[in-house]
Amino acid sequence: MHPELAHFFVLENALADCEHLLLHFRGPVCDLSVRPVTAVTARLRELLAGQGVPLPPAIRAASDPYALLRFILAACPGLAARAEAEICQQEILAAAAARPTPGLRTLLDGPASVSIIGDVCPAAIKGYLARLYRHHTDRVRLIIGRLGADPALLEPTPIPILQAAQLLGVPPAASTVVASTPRTASAPPARPAPALSATPAPPPPGTSSPPPAPPPAPTA
């Protein structure tokens, strides 16, 4: 059996008795890494250069657009809206090319309430679901993504978990969070939500690795 599928079956069993599932968009739902981010990071640096903002070496070399967004918010907040628009466009394009993570359709067909959370813009999440799961979109209870250029909304953050729990009318501990890494499944320390990692297990020695599998506001 494909290692990633084998990992999903283990995860599916662990989620069998869950009532509310909060799936992080990156990893548990899809792999966004298939589209390079070099173009958007170059545009963000151009925005800063156009304002005469000196770039520290780490920012000149940064390949993470969210690191550049954090820098822009601190050093040149007047560019925040333009930077946010650039990143949103990149997220929408990445979601349009994203590879699906095995097993989501099975979870959507199951008894648990499923919500999708993350630090990407809601339009990217909606576009992805419309492309691959158009017959299952009514099974997604909530979509909570990043609205605005607030670094507090970037992962790891408990804000989407708290928002989802409030809208579902349950305490955070009543939901199970599925994230790509334990650090991403960040929840308030006082009332943690159960968290599971959806990262596929490493393949056995001698085999090749499988392909690599957002306050936010709710959207319909």
Image (cartoon, helix red, strand yellow):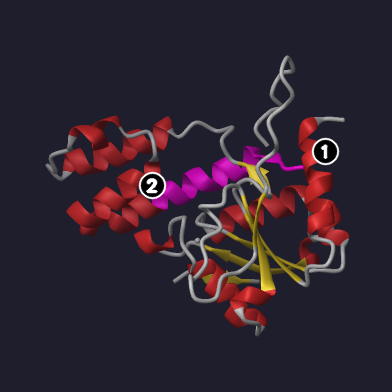
* Residue beneath disc 1: 6
Separation of disc 2 and disc 1 at Cα?
Answer: 32 Å
Q: Residue at x 74, y 17 (%)?
A: 207
Residue 35 x, y percent position in the rendering: 55, 33
Q: Nearer the viewer, residue 90 or 19?
A: 19
Horizontal side, residue 216 vs residue 114: left or right: left
Give residue 66's mark. 2
Question: Which comes before the other along the chain, label 2 or label 1?
Answer: 1
Q: Amino acid at mark 1?
A: Ala
Q: Amino acid at mark 2?
A: Tyr
Give residue 123's quadrant in the image: bottom right
Horizontal side, residue 162 vs residue 129: left or right: left
Q: Nearer the viewer, residue 190 or 153?
A: 190
Vertical arrangement, residue 129 with respect to residue 16, above or below: above
State the quadrant of the C terminus: bottom right
Q: Based on the picture, tell me whether residue 89 belongs to the magenta stretch.
A: yes
Q: Residue at x 72, y 26 (%)?
A: 203
Residue 86 x, y percent position in the rendering: 40, 47
